Image: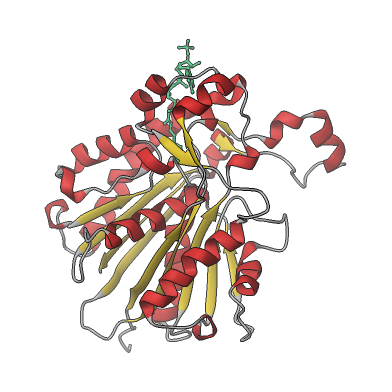
Amino acid sequence: MATLRQSYIAGVGHYVPSRVVTNAELEPMMNTSDAWIQERTGIKERRWFEEGKDTTANMGANAARKALEMAGVTPDDVQLIVFATLSPDYFFPGSGVLLQRELGMKNNAPALDVRNQCSGFIYALSVADQFVRTGMYDTVLVVGSEIHSSGLDKSPEGRGVSVIFGDGAGAVVLRPSTEEGRGILSTHLHSQGEYAEELIVKEPGSNRANRLQHVLDNPQELYPYMNGQNVFKHAVVRFPQVIKEALDQNGYAATDIDMLIPHQANLRITQYVQQKMGLSDDKVYSNVQRYGNTTAASVPIALSEAVQEGKIKKGDLVCLAAFGSGFTWASALLKF
Ligand code: UT7
């Protein structure tokens, strides 16, 4: 069998809305406190979108433009868009086609939406990687973008969930690697549907006799529900497991990792994973303090910032890992 090609990340970019929302701003709204939020999650502030300016698709496009520029390609060079989000602009069509329109692409390239919540970006990256490996496409744009703030219960009833989520977007461009050993080494995807309702936005669900009536009768089901303690319990097991799976497959040890980019769910989860893997502070990237949890956008935003700050350099061994609603979890190991 012929050896498959390897894909590598040729460009990264991110965009976050300009409106900063501090914990102090949430205090009167949600009967919460800066001390509680920081102690339990590490979050100090997050971004909320601006209606009429930011959309899930155009934030993704803003991130994508930077990634395309870094990769040295134009929007019309893109042969496939893979767009990960749990907060699409429309119920249908997906945000991928809207991003294509935003970027002014005229080449009729396919646009695929991926719905795997916090693991969405790594799932999307894995899909993109397969297309490059097989030789079907040379230039694939992978985007994660989310607007949470318009769908949160901002009353005291919603505080357990609403303080953690934020808005933002990140993107990468995948191209075939031209240097031996450089690129995505492997990706690892998992799910466990028995926990589907542990972190969920139920409505508008299609399995209702009358969706609109059901939503009018049960408006609170439009808000996310999370069994936070159970999600936490599973996250701290699945993160180390899926990171180890990637390391084992490629014959590396945790000490070989130059930078771990975990999904930015909660600083306490990241600290637990760091300790479990025996990694020093400089080998784990965290920006949840500034952006909260941006689900499918969190890994590409963190990756893009780490590259921008010079914390990831060409040739570094980088591990991406995520866990979230589904439950789904995933990792990717790559030589940047
Ligand atoms: O993206 C991947 C998916 N998400 C995650 O990975 C999140 C995983 N879970 C978590 O990060 C944590 O469960 C949370 C940070 C969401 C919550 O922390 P917790 O320690 O599990 O809190 P809890 O829900 O058990 O609540 C503890 C107490 C309760 O009060 P009582 O019953 O002890 O009096 C809550 O009512 O804290 C109270 N509480 C709050 N108080 C102030 C819950 N949320 C808040 C809040 N402000 N925002």
Q: Quadrant of the N terminus?
A: bottom left
Give the farthest residue toward the top: 31
Q: Nearer the viewer, residue 215 or 158?
A: 158
Q: Position of residue 202 (x, y in %)?
A: 68, 38
Q: Is residue 166 above or below residue 176?
A: above
Screen quadrant of the C terminus: bottom left
- Image position of 134 (left or right of 165): left
Q: Is residue 283 left or right of residue 173?
A: left
The number of numbered discs placed on residues in the rendered structure image is 0
Residue 330 in sight in this render: no
Q: Residue at x 52, y 26 (%)?
A: 26
Residue in the image at 42% along x and 80% along y: 132
Q: Residue at x 59, y 36 (%)?
A: 197
Q: Position of residue 265 (x, y in %)?
A: 40, 40
Residue 145: x percent and y percent? Answer: 53, 56
Residue at the far bottom in the pictured view: 2
Q: Nearer the viewer, residue 311 or 161?
A: 311
Quadrant housing residue 155? top right
